[in-house]
Image (tube, rainbow, N blue to C red):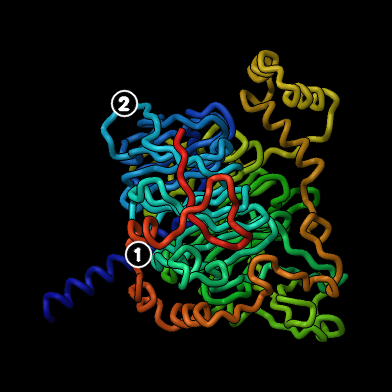
């Protein structure tokens, strides 16, 4: 046997053995955990560094960003931290080579930190991008260029930044809030956006921000269908989208809907393939009567793909309002596509379709596509006393980190010892129940709202739930009022089937007739490698920003759906 083939076969065998071993650990469940404590209030954002995921960044309502080094023998405290934000931090992202860390939040600015610079344990920002006029909901870094990133804001804009371009930037503007943006992990001309009106679009950078003669359709090359219709009563909805995420290869994406289930799409298919529910507990039995299960009605959730799956990332994880994290095993995309049911509009009304079925359709006269329900999570992630907002699967190790209303970052493992921690606790078997309303609880919540800081600090120390007790009690009340919301009676509800053909403000309708967009989607479906290396695959950002884009007056606003360039402001 030639030596090259022997080495290849050996490598393949080792990779297969590693995948099998990690799969078995996932199947057993993550039953050990540790609280990483450094923050003083809710932890909203988590991010692993690019590549091998050596560093974990965490940030939240205390406005600081903590860095945890997983090359330590026993991680118990941050190795360093960053400061600068003047309000809650909502999002974090490492650049392609981990040279920079970016963060954004409620102070309407993106902070850029020099992550590789030798400095003290606590550092300020290298640069502040302060052109947004409302909360930053997401930041996404270019897959290969450290200086390039995008930010999505509640001001209705996506901004494309390049730190090398002498303070110039591009803007994609619409009338409603953006909730997410993410670069495709391998096809660097593509990016994904979501907004508060329930739209999820795949866009092309050149069509969105390039020279004027290349711009078209606000960059949209694919609109993912997010209109829901219920068989039992004909009601329709297009729920708010809290966040979107790709898997590591960009073959699939997950959409986290408010008042609905995490939904899985294939990159080149506009209709969903699967929904992830908690209809059963791990093992397949339904929850006992009165026991809460998966729900997303009270806060914004951020999930993630991961695991050692052979068909891309084989698992998806998400937090829930029931104080648990969830992990589902995702079948191969081709299998899900075969199992997905397609029902004509007439059959949907009069045919033998399950009355509780929920389908996705572009309009009232179009076919309903019923995705496969994945009703049984592989396991729960326990230990939290309140809502779990963020779950993040490590890119290499069998490790999942979670965060939410509490001040801790929770590190979950299938074993009590890992390469960077030892003596992890056994995860509690029981999950805290949502208590009923009480006069004392209402009194505490009112004091939180009024802002009696001294009294709040004193009560936090004496609260039966510990230092996070007041925050937990506050969100308990939100859950009692808004939990288990029905998507078909929420803000995104659109009445019955006859009313779901409302026009799409940004691109006209669900169909995409732009020839350039159709050509791009054909390339992605047939030869994704050719698309990623095709014309302008790596744009010369200095030229595009400084020469091709016209400057817009700071006091003017671009028309809806249009791109522009504007000048950065710095703090």
Residue neighbourhood size for the residue with mark 2, other residues' Cα within 10 Å, grouped as few (<14), some (14–19), many (≥20): few
Q: Which residue is mark 2?
A: 120
- On screen, 317 above or below 84? below
Element type at mark 2: loop
Q: Position of residue 140 (x, y in %)?
A: 46, 53
Distance, label 1 to label 2, CA atoms, is: 36 Å
Q: What residue do we see at 27% from left, 71% from top?
A: 12
Instruction: Confirm whether residue 465 shows in the render.
Output: yes
Query: On the rendered structure, is 302 left or right of 297?
Result: left
* Residue 521 sits above or below residue 281 on the image: below
Circle on res. 539: 1
Q: Nearer the viewer, residue 492 or 302?
A: 492
Q: Is residue 153 left or right of residue 227?
A: left
Q: Secondary structure at mark 1?
A: loop
Percent from the top left, x then y, of residue 513? 60, 81
Quadrant of the frame with the N terminus: bottom left
- Whether residue 506 sits left or right of residue 568 in the image: it is right
Mark 1, residues whose alpha carbon is within 10 Å: few (<14), some, or many (≥20)?
some
């Amino acid at each position: 046997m030639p030596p090259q083939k022997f080495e290849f076969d050996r490598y393949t065998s080792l990779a297969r053995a590693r995948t099998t071993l990690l799969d078995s650990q996932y199947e057993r469940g993550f039953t050990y955990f540790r609280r990483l404590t450094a923050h003083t209030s809710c932890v909203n954002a988590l991010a692993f560094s690019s590549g091998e995921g050596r560093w974990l960044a965490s940030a939240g309502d205390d406005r600081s960003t903590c860095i945890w080094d997983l090359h330590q023998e026993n991680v118990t405290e941050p190795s360093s931290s960053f400061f600068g934000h003047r309000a809650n931090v909502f999002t974090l992202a490492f650049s392609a080579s981990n040279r920079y860390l970016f963060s954004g939040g409620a102070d309407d600015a993106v902070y850029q930190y020099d992550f590789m610079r030798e400095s003290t344990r606590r550092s300020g920002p290298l640069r502040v991008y302060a052109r947004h006029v409302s909360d930053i909901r997401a930041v996404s870094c270019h897959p290969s260029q450290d200086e390039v990133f995008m930010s999505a804001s509640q001001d209705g804009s996506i901004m494309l930044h390049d730190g090398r371009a002498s303070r110039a930037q591009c803007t994609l503007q619409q009338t409603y809030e953006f909730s997410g943006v993410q670069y495709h992990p391998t096809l660097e001309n593509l990016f994904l956006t979501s907004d508060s009106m329930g739209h999820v679009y795949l866009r092309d950078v050149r069509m969105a921000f390039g020279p004027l003669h290349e711009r078209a359709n606000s960059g949209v090359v694919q609109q993912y269908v997010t209109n829901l219709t219920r068989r039992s009563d004909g009601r329709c909805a297009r729920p708010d989208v809290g966040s979107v995420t790709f898997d590591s290869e960009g073959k699939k994406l997950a959409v986290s809907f408010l008042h609905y289930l995490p939904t899985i799409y294939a990159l080149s298919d506009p209709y969903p393939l699967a929904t992830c529910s908690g209809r059963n507990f791990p093992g397949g039995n339904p929850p006992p009567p009165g026991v809460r299960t998966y729900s997303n009605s009270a806060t914004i959730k951020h999930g993630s793909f991961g695991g050692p799956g052979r068909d891309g990332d084989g698992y998806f994880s998400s937090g829930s309002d029931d104080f648990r994290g969830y992990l589902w095993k995702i079948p191969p995309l081709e299998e899900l596509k075969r199992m997905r049911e397609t029902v004509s509009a007439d059959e949907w009304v009069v045919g033998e379709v399950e009355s509780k079925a929920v389908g996705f359709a572009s309009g009232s006269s179009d076919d309903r596509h019923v995705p496969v329900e994945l009703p049984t999570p592989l396991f729960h992630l326990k230990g939290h006393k309140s809502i779990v907002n963020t779950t993040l699967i490590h890119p290499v190790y069998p490790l999942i980190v979670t965060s939410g209303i509490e001040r801790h970052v929770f590190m979950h493992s299938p074993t009590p010892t890992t390469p960077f921690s030892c003596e992890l606790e056994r995860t509690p078997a029981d999950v805290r129940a949502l208590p009923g309303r009480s006069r004392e609880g209402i009194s505490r919540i009112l004091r939180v709202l009024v802002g009696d800081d001294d009294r709040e600090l004193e009560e936090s120390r004496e609260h039966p739930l510990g230092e996070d007790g007041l925050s937990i009690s506050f969100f308990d009340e939100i859950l009692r009022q808004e939990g288990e919301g029905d998507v078909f009676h929420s803000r995104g509800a659109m009445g019955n089937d006859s009313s779901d053909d409302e026009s799409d403000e940004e691109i006209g309708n669900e169909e995409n007739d732009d020839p350039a967009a159709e050509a791009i989607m054909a390339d992605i479906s047939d030869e994704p490698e050719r698309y990623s290396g095709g014309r302008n695959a790596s744009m010369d950002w200095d030229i595009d920003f400084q020469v091709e884009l016209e400057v817009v007056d700071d006091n003017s606003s671009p028309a809806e759906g249009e791109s522009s360039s504007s000048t950065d402001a710095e703090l």
